[in-house]
Protein backbone atom coordinates (compact mmCIF):
# COMPACT_ATOMS: atom_id res chain seq x y z
CA UNK A 1 0.00 0.00 0.00
CA UNK A 2 1.24 3.48 -0.88
CA UNK A 3 2.73 5.36 2.08
CA UNK A 4 1.04 8.72 2.55
CA UNK A 5 2.10 11.31 5.14
CA UNK A 6 -0.56 13.83 6.17
CA UNK A 7 0.99 16.99 7.65
CA UNK A 8 -1.23 19.24 9.78
CA UNK A 9 0.22 22.64 10.75
CA UNK A 10 -1.84 24.37 13.42
CA UNK A 11 -1.95 27.75 15.12
CA UNK A 12 -4.95 29.00 17.11
CA UNK A 13 -7.24 26.36 15.58
CA UNK A 14 -8.17 24.44 18.72
CA UNK A 15 -11.90 24.58 17.98
CA UNK A 16 -11.50 22.94 14.55
CA UNK A 17 -8.57 20.61 15.12
CA UNK A 18 -10.45 17.51 16.28
CA UNK A 19 -12.62 17.59 13.14
CA UNK A 20 -9.49 17.96 11.01
CA UNK A 21 -7.71 14.99 12.60
CA UNK A 22 -10.79 12.77 12.56
CA UNK A 23 -11.27 13.45 8.86
CA UNK A 24 -7.85 11.88 8.27
CA UNK A 25 -8.55 8.93 10.54
CA UNK A 26 -11.79 8.25 8.61
CA UNK A 27 -10.07 7.78 5.23
CA UNK A 28 -10.96 4.72 3.14
CA UNK A 29 -7.26 4.48 2.28
CA UNK A 30 -5.47 4.90 5.62
CA UNK A 31 -2.63 7.36 5.99
CA UNK A 32 0.78 5.88 6.70
CA UNK A 33 1.43 8.64 9.23
CA UNK A 34 -0.23 11.79 10.55
CA UNK A 35 2.11 14.56 11.69
CA UNK A 36 0.68 17.55 13.56
CA UNK A 37 3.01 20.55 13.81
CA UNK A 38 2.08 22.92 16.62
CA UNK A 39 3.37 26.37 15.60
CA UNK A 40 3.66 27.48 19.25
CA UNK A 41 -0.10 27.88 19.40
CA UNK A 42 -1.20 29.61 22.64
CA UNK A 43 -4.50 27.73 22.83
CA UNK A 44 -5.28 24.10 23.66
CA UNK A 45 -4.08 22.60 20.37
CA UNK A 46 -1.52 20.38 22.13
CA UNK A 47 -4.21 18.89 24.35
CA UNK A 48 -6.49 18.19 21.39
CA UNK A 49 -3.71 16.46 19.46
CA UNK A 50 -2.75 14.48 22.56
CA UNK A 51 -6.09 12.70 22.50
CA UNK A 52 -5.12 10.87 19.31
CA UNK A 53 -2.55 8.13 19.76
CA UNK A 54 -2.11 7.75 16.00
CA UNK A 55 -1.00 11.36 15.54
CA UNK A 56 2.66 12.32 15.89
CA UNK A 57 2.97 15.62 17.72
CA UNK A 58 5.72 18.15 16.92
CA UNK A 59 6.08 21.65 18.36
CA UNK A 60 8.21 24.51 17.06
CA UNK A 61 8.80 28.18 17.92
CA UNK A 62 6.23 30.30 16.11
CA UNK A 63 7.40 30.68 12.53
CA UNK A 64 4.29 30.68 10.37
CA UNK A 65 2.58 28.10 8.24
CA UNK A 66 5.44 27.71 5.73
CA UNK A 67 7.96 26.88 8.44
CA UNK A 68 5.50 24.49 10.08
CA UNK A 69 4.78 22.66 6.83
CA UNK A 70 8.49 22.41 6.06
CA UNK A 71 9.16 21.02 9.54
CA UNK A 72 6.56 18.34 8.91
CA UNK A 73 8.05 17.68 5.49
CA UNK A 74 11.50 17.16 7.04
CA UNK A 75 10.07 14.60 9.46
CA UNK A 76 7.83 12.76 6.98
CA UNK A 77 8.72 9.34 5.62
CA UNK A 78 5.83 8.68 3.24
CA UNK A 79 6.24 8.59 -0.52
CA UNK A 80 3.31 11.01 -0.90
CA UNK A 81 2.29 14.10 1.06
CA UNK A 82 -0.97 15.84 1.88
CA UNK A 83 -0.81 19.23 3.62
CA UNK A 84 -3.97 19.80 5.65
CA UNK A 85 -4.38 23.01 7.65
CA UNK A 86 -5.75 22.64 11.16
CA UNK A 87 -9.16 24.10 10.28
CA UNK A 88 -9.94 22.14 7.10
CA UNK A 89 -11.18 18.59 6.49
CA UNK A 90 -10.57 15.75 4.07
CA UNK A 91 -13.55 13.92 2.66
CA UNK A 92 -13.39 10.13 3.29
CA UNK A 93 -12.15 9.11 -0.16
CA UNK A 94 -9.50 11.82 -0.57
CA UNK A 95 -6.45 9.58 -0.24
CA UNK A 96 -8.00 6.70 -2.20
CA UNK A 97 -8.98 9.03 -5.06
CA UNK A 98 -5.54 10.63 -5.26
CA UNK A 99 -3.71 7.30 -5.16
CA UNK A 100 -5.87 6.08 -8.05
CA UNK A 101 -5.07 9.27 -9.97
CA UNK A 102 -1.34 8.69 -9.48
CA UNK A 103 -1.73 5.11 -10.70
CA UNK A 104 -3.43 6.40 -13.86
CA UNK A 105 -0.91 9.26 -14.28
CA UNK A 106 2.44 8.05 -12.94
CA UNK A 107 4.21 10.97 -14.63
CA UNK A 108 2.50 13.52 -12.37
CA UNK A 109 4.42 15.40 -9.68
CA UNK A 110 1.15 15.98 -7.87
CA UNK A 111 -2.51 15.28 -8.42
CA UNK A 112 -5.34 17.52 -7.28
CA UNK A 113 -9.11 17.74 -7.16
CA UNK A 114 -11.84 20.10 -6.08
CA UNK A 115 -13.15 21.28 -2.71
CA UNK A 116 -16.26 22.71 -1.17
CA UNK A 117 -16.48 25.68 1.19
CA UNK A 118 -17.73 25.49 4.76
CA UNK A 119 -18.06 28.03 7.54
CA UNK A 120 -19.24 31.23 5.84
CA UNK A 121 -22.51 31.52 3.99
CA UNK A 122 -21.33 34.31 1.66
CA UNK A 123 -18.33 32.35 0.33
CA UNK A 124 -18.15 31.12 -3.24
CA UNK A 125 -15.80 28.92 -5.22
CA UNK A 126 -15.50 27.95 -8.90
CA UNK A 127 -13.24 25.15 -10.07
CA UNK A 128 -11.85 25.80 -13.55
CA UNK A 129 -8.72 23.84 -14.43
CA UNK A 130 -8.98 23.91 -18.24
CA UNK A 131 -5.33 24.28 -19.40
CA UNK A 132 -4.54 27.56 -21.21
CA UNK A 133 -2.74 25.81 -22.97
CA UNK A 134 -1.01 24.18 -19.98
CA UNK A 135 -1.76 23.92 -16.29
CA UNK A 136 1.15 26.30 -15.69
CA UNK A 137 -0.45 29.09 -17.72
CA UNK A 138 -3.80 28.36 -16.07
CA UNK A 139 -2.13 28.89 -12.70
CA UNK A 140 -0.76 32.22 -13.93
CA UNK A 141 -4.30 33.36 -14.73
CA UNK A 142 -5.91 32.11 -11.53
CA UNK A 143 -5.11 29.61 -8.83
CA UNK A 144 -7.53 26.87 -9.84
CA UNK A 145 -6.03 24.48 -7.27
CA UNK A 146 -6.74 26.58 -4.21
CA UNK A 147 -5.66 25.27 -0.78
CA UNK A 148 -3.05 22.50 -0.67
CA UNK A 149 -5.47 20.10 1.04
CA UNK A 150 -6.92 19.28 -2.39
CA UNK A 151 -3.58 17.94 -3.63
CA UNK A 152 -1.35 14.94 -3.03
CA UNK A 153 2.34 15.52 -3.77
CA UNK A 154 5.27 13.26 -4.43
CA UNK A 155 7.52 13.92 -1.43
CA UNK A 156 10.66 13.72 -3.56
CA UNK A 157 9.43 16.55 -5.81
CA UNK A 158 8.46 18.86 -2.93
CA UNK A 159 11.88 18.28 -1.39
CA UNK A 160 13.61 18.92 -4.71
CA UNK A 161 11.97 22.32 -5.20
CA UNK A 162 12.67 23.39 -1.62
CA UNK A 163 9.25 23.12 0.01
CA UNK A 164 7.28 26.21 1.00
CA UNK A 165 8.94 29.63 0.96
CA UNK A 166 8.74 31.45 4.34
CA UNK A 167 7.64 35.06 4.05
CA UNK A 168 5.02 34.32 1.40
CA UNK A 169 2.14 33.54 3.77
CA UNK A 170 -1.05 34.03 1.81
CA UNK A 171 0.53 33.15 -1.55
CA UNK A 172 2.85 30.33 -0.48
CA UNK A 173 0.60 27.62 -1.93
CA UNK A 174 0.52 29.11 -5.40
CA UNK A 175 4.27 29.74 -5.29
CA UNK A 176 4.87 26.03 -4.64
CA UNK A 177 2.52 25.08 -7.48
CA UNK A 178 4.42 27.42 -9.83
CA UNK A 179 7.80 25.97 -8.95
CA UNK A 180 6.58 22.41 -9.43
CA UNK A 181 4.61 22.92 -12.66
CA UNK A 182 7.46 24.78 -14.37
CA UNK A 183 9.30 21.48 -14.67
CA UNK A 184 6.79 18.70 -13.97
CA UNK A 185 3.40 17.58 -15.27
CA UNK A 186 0.44 17.51 -12.91
CA UNK A 187 -3.03 15.98 -13.12
CA UNK A 188 -6.42 17.23 -11.91
CA UNK A 189 -9.04 14.54 -11.34
CA UNK A 190 -11.82 17.11 -10.60
CA UNK A 191 -13.36 15.09 -7.73
CA UNK A 192 -14.46 17.02 -4.63
CA UNK A 193 -12.17 15.62 -1.94
CA UNK A 194 -11.83 18.29 0.77
CA UNK A 195 -13.67 20.95 2.75
CA UNK A 196 -12.02 24.36 3.03
CA UNK A 197 -13.18 26.36 6.02
CA UNK A 198 -13.74 30.11 5.69
CA UNK A 199 -13.82 32.21 8.86
CA UNK A 200 -12.99 35.78 9.76
CA UNK A 201 -9.73 35.00 11.59
CA UNK A 202 -8.02 33.04 8.81
CA UNK A 203 -4.92 34.43 7.10
CA UNK A 204 -6.37 34.25 3.57
CA UNK A 205 -9.18 36.61 4.61
CA UNK A 206 -6.59 39.35 5.27
Image: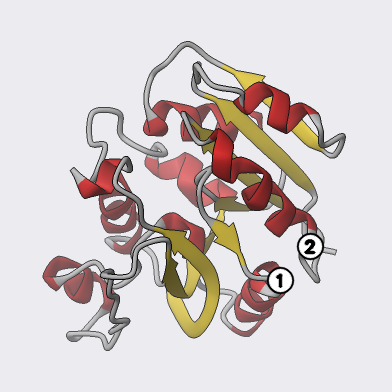
Q: Where is residue 46 in the image (x, y as percent from the top left)?
A: 66, 23
Which secondary structure lies at badge 2? loop
**First reached walking from the N terminus: tag 2 or tag 1:** 2
Return the residue at label 1: 92
Q: Position of residue 13 (x, y in %)?
A: 50, 36
Spatial CA distance of label 2 from label 1 is 6 Å
Residue 143 position by quadrant: bottom left
Image-based side of 27 in relation to 12, left or right: right
| Residue at screen point 18% across, 43% down | 206
**Which colour scheme appears in the figure?**
secondary structure
Tag shown at residue 9: none
| Residue at screen point 12% across, 72% down | 141
Q: Position of residue 34 (x, y in %)?
A: 72, 42
Front residue of 105 and 148: 148
In the image, farthest residue toward the top: 61
Instruction: Note whether 29 is above or below 130 in the view shown.
Output: above
Residue 161 position by quadrant: top left
| Residue at screen point 29% across, 52% down | 179
Image-based side of 109 in relation to 198, left or right: right
| Residue at screen point 77% across, 44% down | 33
Q: Position of residue 133 (x, y in %)?
A: 19, 86
Image-based side of 39 in relation to 199, left or right: right
Instruction: Note whether 50 is above or below 62 in the view shown.
Output: below
In the image, farthest residue toward the front: 121
Front residue of 12 and 65: 12
User: Looking at the image, do the residues carrying marks 2 and 1 touch, with CB atoms under 8 Å apart?
Assistant: yes
Which secondary structure lies at badge 1? loop
Residue 77 visible in the current orientation: no
Return the residue at label 2: 26
Instruction: Note whether 42 is above or below 8 in the view shown.
Output: above
Residue 28 visible in the current orientation: yes
In the picture, the quarter occupied by the N terminus is: bottom right
Amino acid sequence: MEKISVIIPCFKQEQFLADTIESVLAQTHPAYEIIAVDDASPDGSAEVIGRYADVRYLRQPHGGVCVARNYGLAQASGDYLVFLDGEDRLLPEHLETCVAAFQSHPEAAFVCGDYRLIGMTDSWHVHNCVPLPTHYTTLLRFNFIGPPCVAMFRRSVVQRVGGFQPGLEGTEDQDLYFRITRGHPIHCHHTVIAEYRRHVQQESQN
